[in-house]
């Protein structure tokens, strides 16, 4: 019996998601190993034959930096083991907020990461809800940029909110909120913030009428939760019936969990691109991306359309 051409492997920190992906794909997770040494270095290896196989490596690149290094070493090992094709599946693409020089003499972290991925030997990248769309142009290999809207839309419809309205916690997310509003046939509002310094908001204003509305604040990332929580409080002050937060990547750094727990949000809706501990955190609703990634891997292998997954009304079965 011929072995399957597709082999799906995982880095240590994304194994929880990779296991769900292979279950949806109806295959087994590939065997790999990471040996850790006393000086902090580690070595990756594949514990099965991958010669001539299409290798998909699932690993998000959230901190620590070891996650990026582990992914790079797995890519290098696959290349040296004569894999036919190497696809990096990066649910959360770290350093995506460093996509340009915003002041003199700074690095462009996302460009550096894409250079490292290319040098290591990837043939393709699959990711979801990049913070900056232009990062796709940093690579000279195909990039499948997925959208969590195909997961969030059905969930929002299932809530049957009588006066649903989308909102963006800042002007940078206007396009995203407008896209959700169009897909769900609702209006949208925008919060405008001014910062005195990084992670500190001086003042915020609301553009749009939210009175009597069930508002969903949508973003790609919740990090410290300061901006989205302030926006939620402002929306409730302006007469909204309810407010929810929704974001693809739940970084939850610092005291974000405490901030969100004490926020006016009825729900904090996120995906599983980053592992989220929901213990004693009943406001959080985690939706899985596993079925979406499994379907995209299948379509990549069969040279089928991926963009059709994100047509209005499309559902991932």
Image: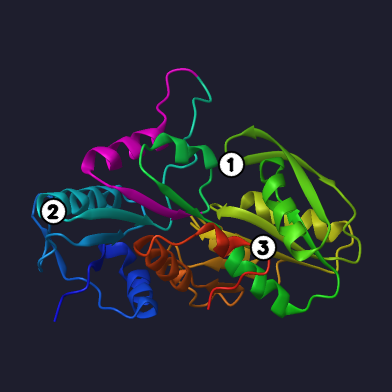
Q: Residue at x 22, y 68 (%)?
A: 5
Q: Which residue is drawn at 72% across and 78% down?
A: 159
Given residues 156 and 43, the one toward you in this image is 156
Given residues 253 and 314, the one toward you in this image is 314
Residue at mark 3:
245
Determine if the magenta segment contains residue 299.
Answer: no
Sequence-wise, the earlier of marks 3 and 2 is 2
Give neighbour class at mark 1: few <14, some 14-19, many 20+ (Cα, 10 Å).
Answer: few
Residue at mark 1:
199
Do the CB atoms of the residues marked 3 and 1 lie less than 8 Å apart? no
The magenta span reads 104-128
Q: Which of marks 3 and 1 is in front?
A: 3
Where residue 230 sits in the image (x, y, percent)?
71, 52
- In which quadrant of the rendered view does residue 170 lie? top right
Where residue 41 sits in the image (x, y, percent)?
13, 50
Helix, strand or loop at label 2? It is: strand
Q: Residue 14 carries which label?
A: none
160 displayed left or right of 39: right
Given residues 228 and 302, the one toward you in this image is 302
Sequence-wise, the earlier of marks 1 and 2 is 2
Q: Look at the picture and state if 194 lies above or below 89.
A: above
Residue at mark 2:
42
- Tell me how far mark 1 sits from mark 2, CA to CA: 34 Å
């Amino acid at each position: 019996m011929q072995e399957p051409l597709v082999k799906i492997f995982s880095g240590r920190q994304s194994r929880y998601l990779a296991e769900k992906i292979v279950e949806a794909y109806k295959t087994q997770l590939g065997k790999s190993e990471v040996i850790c040494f006393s000086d902090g270095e580690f070595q990756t290896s594949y514990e099965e034959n991958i010669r001539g196989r299409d290798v998909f490596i699932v690993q998000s690149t959230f901190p620590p930096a070891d996650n990026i290094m582990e992914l790079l070493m797995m890519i290098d090992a696959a290349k040296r083991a004569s894999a036919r094709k190497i696809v990096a599946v990066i649910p959360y693409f770290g350093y995506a907020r460093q996509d340009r020089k915003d002041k003199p003499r700074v690095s462009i972290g996302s460009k550096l990461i894409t250079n490292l991925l290319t040098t290591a030997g990837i043939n393709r990248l699959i990711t979801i809800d990049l913070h900056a769309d232009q990062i796709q142009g940093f690579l000279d290999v195909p990039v499948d940029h997925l959208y969590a809207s195909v997961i969030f839309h059905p969930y929002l419809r299932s809530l049957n909110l009588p006066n649903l309205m989308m909102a963006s916690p800042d002007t940078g997310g206007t396009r995203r909120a407008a896209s959700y509003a169009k897909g769900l046939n609702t209006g949208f509002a925008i919060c405008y913030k001014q910062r005195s310094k990084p992670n500190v908001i001086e003042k915020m204003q609301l553009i749009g009428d939210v009175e009597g509305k069930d508002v969903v604040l949508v973003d790609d990332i919740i990090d410290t939760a300061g901006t989205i929580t302030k926006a939620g409080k402002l929306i409730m002050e302006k007469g909204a019936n309810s407010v929810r937060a929704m974001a693809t990547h739940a970084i939850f750094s610092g005291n974000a969990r405490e901030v969100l727990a004490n926020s006016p949000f009825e729900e904090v809706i996120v995906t599983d691109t980053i592992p989220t501990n929901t213990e004693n955190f009943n406001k959080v609703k985690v939706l899985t991306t596993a079925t979406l990634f499994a379907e995209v891997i299948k379509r990549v292998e069969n040279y089928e359309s991926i963009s059709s997954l994100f047509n209005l009304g499309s559902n991932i079965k």
